[in-house]
Image: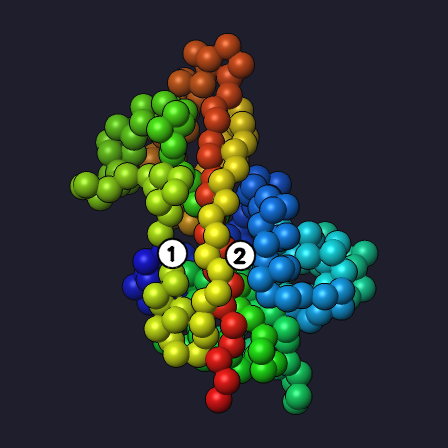
Amino acid sequence: MADRKPADRDRLKVTFDTVADSYDAARPDYPDALYDALIVAANLRTGSRLLEIGSGTGKATTPLAERGFAVTCLEPGGRLAAVARRRLAHFPQVDVIESAFEDWQPGPGERFDLVFAATAWHWIDPAVGYQLAWQALRPGGHLAIWTAVHVLPADGDRFFREIQPVYDEIGEGLPPGTGLPKPGRLPTIRASIDGSGLFTVGVTQEFIWERNYTAAEYIALLDTFSSHIDMAQWQRDRLYAEVRRQLATRPDGKLRQHWGAVLHVAKRNAG
């Protein structure tokens, strides 16, 4: 979750709005155990007020709304916000606001028990993100951050090693000496959160889950990643043809992908 250059961050973070409906269908849900850990670590109660940064289509909002929390969602993408409103329409305690976090301010006296970002914090301007989160929280409130990433365990699907030469061929390979993160070794941003001086991290907990994808399902997923949306058409054509070719040789036509996330929960410091 290294910080992106501002120009790249600002350009790529708006790409998701062009694929709002497919984003909602293709992106994986987070495991229930993550929400259970979050509720305990942030000391949430039914009716607690939550502020979500970059809510997208409501993938993380829905499970928390179902648990009885009031959620104010900030989503800068108009199409993503529209999908979220449809998805969350039956939760009267959820409000979706079309706004970037950096451009929004709470109302007079309005403060939240939890500010959270699910696979969205890396798009926030690091110069102001922690300060704005601190200001939005009540004394004793919490900040929670997690990001879903592709991980590759030792017994993971060989597909991801076999497809890598195609990424190299189209100029989208991994930097030399790097690879996909492994379970038990996912990077954290604990030092960044603590280093802000505004929060103290109390919990960093890793979660691993997996999903199976057909070629069509996996390509639909890839089409929701900013890196793939930003590719030239010829690059996507070459890559997706190879995805189809490789999976067509398998009896069930599917790949097995592992996901990982590190949940960070930090308490707001006083003063």
Is residue 207 visible from the viewing direction of this image?
yes
Nearer to the camera, 206 or 180: 206
Q: Is mark 2 on a helix, strand or loop?
A: strand
Nearer to the camera, 202 or 136: 202
Q: In this view, does 181 lie above or below 13?
A: above
Is residue 97 visible from the viewing direction of this image?
no
Residue identified by numbered label 2: 118
Q: In the image, what residue occupies the spot 48% across and 26% down?
A: 256
Dot 1: within a 10 Å radius of its alpha carbon, few (fewer than 14), some, or many (20 or more) residues?
Answer: some
238 left or right, relative to 62? left
Q: Where is residue 180 in the image (x, y as percent from the top left)?
A: 33, 39
Under mark 2, the amino acid is: Ala
Q: How far apart are marks 2 and 1 (CA)?
A: 14 Å
Q: In this view, does 222 lie above or below 267?
A: above
Q: In the image, what residue occupies the spot 64% across and 76% down?
A: 112
Dot 2: within a 10 Å radius of its alpha carbon, few (fewer than 14), some, or many (20 or more) residues?
Answer: many
181 left or right, relative to 75? left
Q: Position of residue 251 (x, y in %)?
A: 50, 10
Q: Is mark 1 on a helix, strand or loop?
A: loop
Under mark 1, the amino acid is: Thr
Q: Do the residues labelled 2 and 1 touch (CB within 8 Å)?
A: no
162 left or right, relative to 143? left
Q: Where is residue 84 in the image (x, y as percent from the top left)?
A: 67, 56
Residue identified by numbered label 1: 188
Q: In the image, what residue occupies the spot 28% across and 39% down?
A: 179
Q: Position of residue 233 (x, y in %)?
A: 38, 38
Q: In this view, does 243 lie above or below 170?
A: above
What residue occupies the far left of the structure in this picture? 176
Nearer to the camera, 243 or 18: 243
Q: Earlier in the sequence, mark 2 or mark 1?
A: 2
